[in-house]
Every structure is written in structure tokens, then in C-alpha cells.
Image: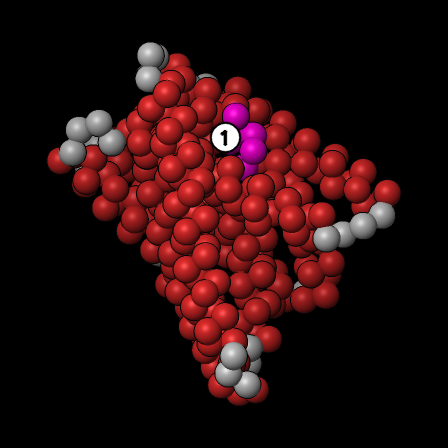
């Protein structure tokens, strides 16, 4: 295993497992974590947007000069891909939600587990794609994935506990789900060794997926909270999230 693959695997594993810390904190201090989780969503949205504009797209334009049309086509494709994935997951969830009482509770947990595994697989693929282009870009992407995973894991843990799943099983399934990310990283790296030219489409898809998560999932959740004080705090955290990703790019400069 070369250094790039090793770095990508390490970053994918760490970002995924560290993301679980939000869920573990929820089990420890439920009310406190739930109170601040909504605020962290604003930071996570800013981090994803920062990763898109300051890292993924900036690196794509620099690394693949003259291929901007192809890059932004793949960005649009990544955006649409995540739209389709989320629609499919929501359709399945809606079909099962028609069941009443205990039946609904029994299927809700497995659906969350499946959805989490799908998202972790895509996260692992995105991290691998970034490291294939540049080590600094890979680090920035892994950091952005972590910031997104933290509030997502808090939500997953909360829903699974609410569905009546025992805490031990919640921890077990989420840890197993976290391991899907490094698995996806390995598979992506192996595919890249056999198929030339994967870096550009994977980079574009990564940017499109981050853009979709921020604009379609996180920002609508932010907008559900009203009040001038809350809005100012959300805006501040959004900007801080973007600046953090800009800072990550300074600390781990791209070599392209």
C-alpha cells in the first residue's frame, strides 16, 4: 500500500469514527447535546460549503485546466445523484411509516442503519477521490466529512433510541456503519488503479454531493429555527465553518 492510499484510509477511518463521538455524547448527556446539536448544524453547513468552494472546486479548476465544463458537469451530476439517493431512501421510509405503532418502530431502526451505511460509503469514496488528486485536498475533505458526520450521528443515535432500540445495539450498528467508510475508500482506490481518469468525475461528484447536503439538508434544518438572535448566531457559525475550511487549506496546502 503506497503512502497516498495509507493516508486516505487513515483519514477515512478517523473522520468516520470521530463522527461517532457526537452519538456517544448524546448517550451521555442527552438534553445538553440535543440543545447544541442544532447550532452545530450551521457550522457543519459552512464547513461543507467551504470545502466545495475553497478546496474541491478550486483544486479541480487548478488540477484540470481546460476541463472546467467537464468538472462542473460532474458537479451537477453529483448534486442530482444525491437528490436521487435521498428520494429513494425517503420513499422506502415513507412506505414503512404507513405501518402503525410497534411495526413502524421496528422498521425505523433498520432504515436508519441502511441510510447511514449508504452515506458512509459515499463519504469514503469522496475522501479517496480527494486524496487521489492531492494530499492536502484529502485532509480538507476528511475534515469536512467529520464536521458533517458529527450532527448526523447525533440525529441517527437519537432516532434509533426513540425507535426503541437498546443502547448497546445502537452503538454496535453505528460502529459497524462507520467502518463502511474506510471500506469504500479501499474499493475506490483499487478501482482507480484499474481505471484511468477517475479523479475528475469523482472530484466533481464529491463537490456536488457536499453542495447538495449543505443546501438541501442542513440549511433547511437551520431555517426551521426562527428569531433574530438565533439567526445571527447561525450566520456567525456558518461563516466560521467556511473560514475553518479555508484555514485547513492554509495549514495543509494543495500541491496542484
Q: Is residue 210 above or below residue 174?
A: above
User: Is residue 131 or residue 74 the one in the foreground?
Assistant: 74
100 lies above or below 223: below
- In this view, 17 is above or below 111: above
Instruction: Tell me if residue 52 is in the magenta stretch.
Output: yes
Return the x and y of residue 48 as percentages of the image width and height.
54, 37
Residue 106: x and y in percent read: 47, 81
Tag 1's secondary structure? helix
| Residue closer to the observer: 97 or 214 | 97
Tell me which secondary structure the magenta stretch mostly adopts.
helix
Name the residue rendered at 47%, 69% in the picture. Answer: 93
Give the residue at x 57% y 56%: 22
Q: Is residue 110 magenta?
A: no
Q: Can see residue 163? A: yes
Residue nearer the viewer, 62 or 161: 62
**Spot occupied by residue 225 in the image (x, y as percentages of width and height):** 76, 52
Farthest top residue in view: 66
Bounds of the magenta segment: 48-53
Q: Quadrant of residue 127?
A: top left
Compared across the picture, whether 85 is left or right of 241 comes to: left
Going 39% across and 45% down the picture, which residue do you hit?
81
Is residue 92 depicted above or below 207 in this figure? below
Count neighbours of disc 1 (C-alpha within 10 A) and say few if under 14, some if 14 to 19, many if 20 or more.
Answer: many
Q: Pointer 1: what residue?
A: 52
Residue 19 drawn at (x, y percent): 50, 51
- Can you say which quadrant of the picture contains the N terminus? top left
Give the number of callouts: 1
- Single out the residue that lies furthest toward the right: 228
Residue at (50, 83) in percent of width and height: 99
Q: On the rendered structure, is 3 left or right of 119?
A: left
Is residue 123 visible in this depiction of the protein? no
Amino acid at each position: 500500500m503506497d503512502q497516498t492510499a495509507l493516508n486516505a484510509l487513515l483519514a477515512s477511518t478517523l473522520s468516520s469514527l470521530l463522527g461517532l463521538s457526537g452519538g456517544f455524547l448524546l448517550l451521555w448527556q442527552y438534553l445538553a447535546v440535543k440543545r447544541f446539536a442544532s447550532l452545530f448544524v450551521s457550522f457543519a453547513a459552512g464547513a461543507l460549503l467551504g470545502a466545495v468552494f475553497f478546496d474541491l472546486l478550486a483544486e479541480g479548476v487548478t488540477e484540470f485546466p481546460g476541463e472546467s465544463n467537464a468538472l462542473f458537469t460532474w458537479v451537477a451530476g453529483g448534486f442530482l445523484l444525491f437528490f436521487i439517493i435521498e428520494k429513494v431512501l425517503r420513499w422506502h421510509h415513507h412506505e414503512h411509516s404507513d405501518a402503525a405503532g410497534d411495526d413502524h418502530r421496528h422498521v425505523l431502526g433498520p432504515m436508519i442503519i441502511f441510510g447511514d451505511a449508504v452515506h458512509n460509503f459515499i463519504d469514503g469514496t469522496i475522501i479517496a477521490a480527494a486524496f487521489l488528486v492531492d494530499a492536502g485536498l484529502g485532509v480538507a475533505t476528511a475534515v469536512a466529512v467529520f464536521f458533517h458526520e458529527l450532527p448526523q450521528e447525533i440525529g441517527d443515535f437519537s432516532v434509533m433510541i426513540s425507535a426503541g432500540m437498546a443502547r448497546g445495539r445502537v452503538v454496535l450498528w453505528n460502529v459497524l456503519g462507520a467502518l463502511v467508510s474506510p471500506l469504500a475508500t479501499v474499493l475506490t482506490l483499487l478501482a482507480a488503479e484499474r481505471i484511468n481518469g477517475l479523479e475528475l468525475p469523482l472530484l466533481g461528484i464529491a463537490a456536488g454531493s457536499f453542495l447538495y447536503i449543505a443546501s438541501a439538508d442542513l440549511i433547511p434544518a437551520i431555517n426551521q429555527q426562527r428569531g433574530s438572535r438565533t439567526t445571527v448566531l447561525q450566520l456567525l457559525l456558518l461563516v466560521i465553518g467556511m473560514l475553518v475550511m479555508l484555514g485547513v487549506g492554509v495549514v495543509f496546502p494543495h500541491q496542484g
